[in-house]
Amino acid sequence: MIVLWGSVVLAGLLGLSLVRRRVVRRRLSRLRGPAAGSADRRTRLFAAAAAGLAVVAVIGRWWAVPVGVAVSIGADQFLRRREPAAVRAARLRAVADLPLGADLLAAVLRAGAPVDRAALAVADALGGPLGERLDRVGRSLRLGAEPPEAWAHLADVPGADRLVAAAVRSSASGGALAGALTRLADDLRGDRSVAVEAAAHRAGVLIVLPLGLCFLPAFVLAGLVPVVVAVIGDVL
C-alpha cells in the first residue's frame, strides 16, 4: 500500500514538473515574439522575383526564362548576404553598449540583487538593442529558464559570448559573477581601443593610396616623358 501511494505521489510530481516546464517554454516563446526576419525575407524574395521578371521582359525570347530564373536566384543570394542598415546599426549600438552593460550588471550584483533583477534593472537603464536583449534574459530567468537558454538572447551580439560564458559558468559553479563582469568590461574596452587604433592606421593607408595613384602618372607625364621625347629627338 505504501509503495502504491508512493508511486502515485511520484507520478503526480513528475506530471506537475512536465506541465510547469511546458508552461515556461510557452512563455519563453512569447518573449521571442514573431520572427524578425519574416518581413525582410518577403521583401528579398519580391526583389529577386522582380529582377528575374525584368530580365525576361527585356530579352523577350523563350530562352529568357531560364536566364530570368538564374538572375532571380543570384539576386536572392546576393540580397541574403547583405545586412540591412537597421540591423547593422542595432548591432553596432549593442556592441558599443556592451562594456557599460557589463559594468552596470557587476554594480547591481554587488549591491545584492539576484541575477534576473540585475538584468532587468540594467535593461531599463540602458535601453536600445542591448537593453531589449537583457530584458529578455531577465524575464527568461524569472520564468525559470535554464541559464544557457536565458543568456542565449545575447548570442547574436559580437563580443557577448564571453559574458554569456561567464554567466553560465557562475550559475553552474557558484563563482562570483560581478568580478568576472568587471574584468570583461575592461577587456572589451581594451579590444575596442585596439580596433580603433587599427582602423586609424588602415584609414591612413587608404588615404595615401589615391594620392600615390594620382602622383605617379603626373610624375611620369611631367618628368619622364619630356626627357624621353628630348632624347629620342636628339637621336633621330
Image (cartoon, rainbow, N blue to C red):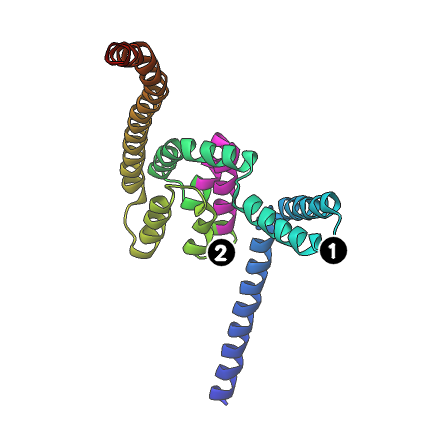
Magenta highlight: main SS: helix
Is residue 34 in sight in this rendering? Answer: no
Instruction: Indicate whether 23 appears above or below 101.
Output: below
For the point 72% across and 46% down, the residue is 59
Is residue 175 in sight in this rendering? Answer: yes
Image quarter of residue 198: top left
Q: Name which residue type carries label 1.
A: Trp
Q: What is the secondary structure assignment of the residue under circle 1?
A: loop
| Residue 220 in picture, x, y percent from top left | 31, 16
Q: Viewer-nearest of labels 1 and 2?
A: 1
For the point 55% across and 64% down, the residue is 20
- Mark 1 or mark 2, which has the lower sequence index? 1
Q: Name which residue type carries label 2.
A: Gly
Report, in whole angstroms, how far the alpha carbon at label 1 lies from the one at label 2.
60 Å
Q: Residues within 10 Å of mark 1 (few under 14, many from 20)?
A: few
Instruction: Give the residues in magenta.
Output: 119-140
| Residue 5 in picture, x, y percent from top left | 52, 84
| Residue 96 in picture, x, y percent from top left | 41, 31
Q: Residues within 10 Å of mark 2 (few under 14, many from 20)?
A: some
Q: From the image, tell me which residue sits under label 1.
A: 62
Q: From the image, tell me which residue sits under label 2.
A: 144
